[in-house]
Amino acid sequence: MMDHFADRLNAAIRAKGNAVCVGLDPRWESLPLALRQRHGDHSLEAMARAFEEFSCRIIDLVAPLVPVVKPQSAFFEMCGPAGMTAQLRVLRHAHAAGLLTILDAKRNDIASTATAYADAAFAGSAIAGTVHPVWDADALTINPYLGRDAVEPFIQSARLSGRGLFVLVRTSNPGAGQFQDLICDGRPVYRHVAEAVSAWNREHLAASGFGDVGAVVGATHPAELAEVRQVLPEAIFLVPGYGAQGGAARDVAPAFRDDGLGAIVNSSRGIIFAFKPEQADWESGVVQATHKTIADLAAVTPMGRLAGR
Amino acid sequence: MMDHFADRLNAAIRAKGNAVCVGLDPRWESLPLALRQRHGDHSLEAMARAFEEFSCRIIDLVAPLVPVVKPQSAFFEMCGPAGMTAQLRVLRHAHAAGLLTILDAKRNDIASTATAYADAAFAGSAIAGTVHPVWDADALTINPYLGRDAVEPFIQSARLSGRGLFVLVRTSNPGAGQFQDLICDGRPVYRHVAEAVSAWNREHLAASGFGDVGAVVGATHPAELAEVRQVLPEAIFLVPGYGAQGGAARDVAPAFRDDGLGAIVNSSRGIIFAFKPEQADWESGVVQATHKTIADLAAVTPMGRLAGR
């Protein structure tokens, strides 16, 4: 039996002394030129192999520095079935490198269909009583719009195998408020979602006091971040929107508890594309950007209290 | 340039004289026993091949009878990368059989990530200026929780290639109301989503008066179905929940316009598993169930006005 997701995540965060998540969002036009040329027949299969090689190289570079990576499933899906093979290998490579993985796929459906997505992500797919791991991720992002009986199958599958969920609560995009900010019974929809996440999360708290149903709350809305932190004191936050999307390091501060735990801050482009495609030593750009991200966040958020522990 | 999605769908509906969509939700334990035994090594790859063979056989059986099929991506994803190959082949087989396809994947993300999902579904993925089709579906289901700038990339990609979208508005599951029914400014969240769908849909109406951004509204809530029909007179509805999920034929009636157009009614288990696994003539069960579904709906909904045209 695997340990509780929150305990595994907190152990990884403490071991690395920071809570930075590197987002693996491969984009063909931004890849190092030399790498593109090595996979240059311009087929979907070639793009998938290039995405795999690039993502695995990023994993090797950041594995000594950060606790977790987050493959973005959309970029692998755009390569078709070959991309799904690449996604699988990238997830395995991250585990082998000692990293935790969040599969960012924003899955959602009802009843046994939700179970199919969840088992693929976590517990494995059962055929005639035998269970086969599929993505085998440590956590998955999910969309709550369909309501409790669409979320609960994900929770069940995650708990069977010590995994975690991150439920979209308040996202980082400019149009996020169109539905998330509608006011119902005196508070916005995202607050209702946060309250539901709180109830799910409290069903299964680890010894550390954190649960396994976390919340996605964007760095581009610091006030909402602080508000949702109040509603969800025991939940782990996954915070997108830092860096390329406009969120500053100090905007992220309210996501953390005072002890520096409780949040992971994602950076994708700001780290994985911190170079010019024609740059031969692109890898040093990635390593420097990772160090700088950690330092920037440690300087102005409670995450700084983790370093050197 | 492909014709407008609504014109293509309406032509297919008129040609078949009904608006039934067959949901392709393969489940290992429900497959014909003989078919399972032929793919019996109990690996994910074997399950994927069984799902492909079964789905393609269903397509052959229903192609003369109905206008559209809806592969449920979750069941293919549970087989891992091999399942995505099966999903691709099933979509191609459906096109070759003259059917329209709705990929039920409930995708959602922001900005260029949404574009990656959308291009995979529709326009194709671009590598160095060359565009490669991926799923090449006629329509895709999407989840609106992230707001306008998460939906618009899907609309853009769909319109580039004459495809359509079905946005989750009011779903068919018992817990759907947890967030969808919250009252904001005097009306429920799903009504706000319906109003947004109306605005997107009206941007690009076909000569027939229908648009390319449709709505998913469950058959299990006939009152809401009628209400959303009022808000969205020009939108095509995708109605799940008929049959196995408890919606009766008469519950579906408010989804249609008086002329019998404007809705497609999905049935999955009620058609594709209308047999006992050990039944040798399982195919006749599927054909009979398809005829019965069409007849039941034609008897008590405006869909009956399409027959024989």
Image: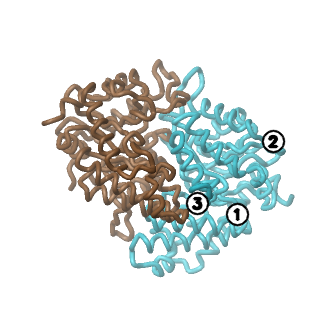
Chain colours: A cyan, B brown
Residue under the image location 25 percent in, 27 percent down: B299
Q: Disc 3 sits on a residue from what chain?
A: A
When the figure is inspected, residue A251 is found, relative to residue B126, above or below; the finding is above
Instruction: Indicate the position of residue A94 as horizontal and vertical percent values.
Output: 66, 66
Going by the numbered disc 2, the residue's amino acid type is Gly
Q: Residue furthest left?
A: B309
Residue A99 — which label? Answer: 1
Q: Disc 1 sits on a residue from what chain?
A: A
* Screen quadrant of the C terminus of chain B: top left
Residue A209 — which label? Answer: 2
Residue B143 — which label? Answer: none
- Residues B101 and A268: in front is B101
Residue under the image location 33 percent in, 36 percent down: B265
Q: Is residue A103 visible?
A: no
Q: Disc 2 sits on a residue from what chain?
A: A
Q: Nearer the viewer, mark 2 or mark 3?
A: 3
Q: Dot 2: within a 10 Å radius of its alpha carbon, few (fewer than 14), some, or many (20 or more) residues?
A: few
Instruction: Indicate the position of residue B57 as horizontal and vertical percent values.
Output: 34, 56
Query: Can you tell which quarter of the image residue B206 is in?
Result: top left
Residue A134 — which label? Answer: 3
Going by the numbered disc 1, the residue's amino acid type is Leu
Upstream in the sequence, badge 1 or badge 2?
1
Q: Seen in the image, is A49 located left or right of residue A97?
A: left
Residue under the image location 31 percent in, 36 percent down: B293
- Residues B114 and A300: in front is B114
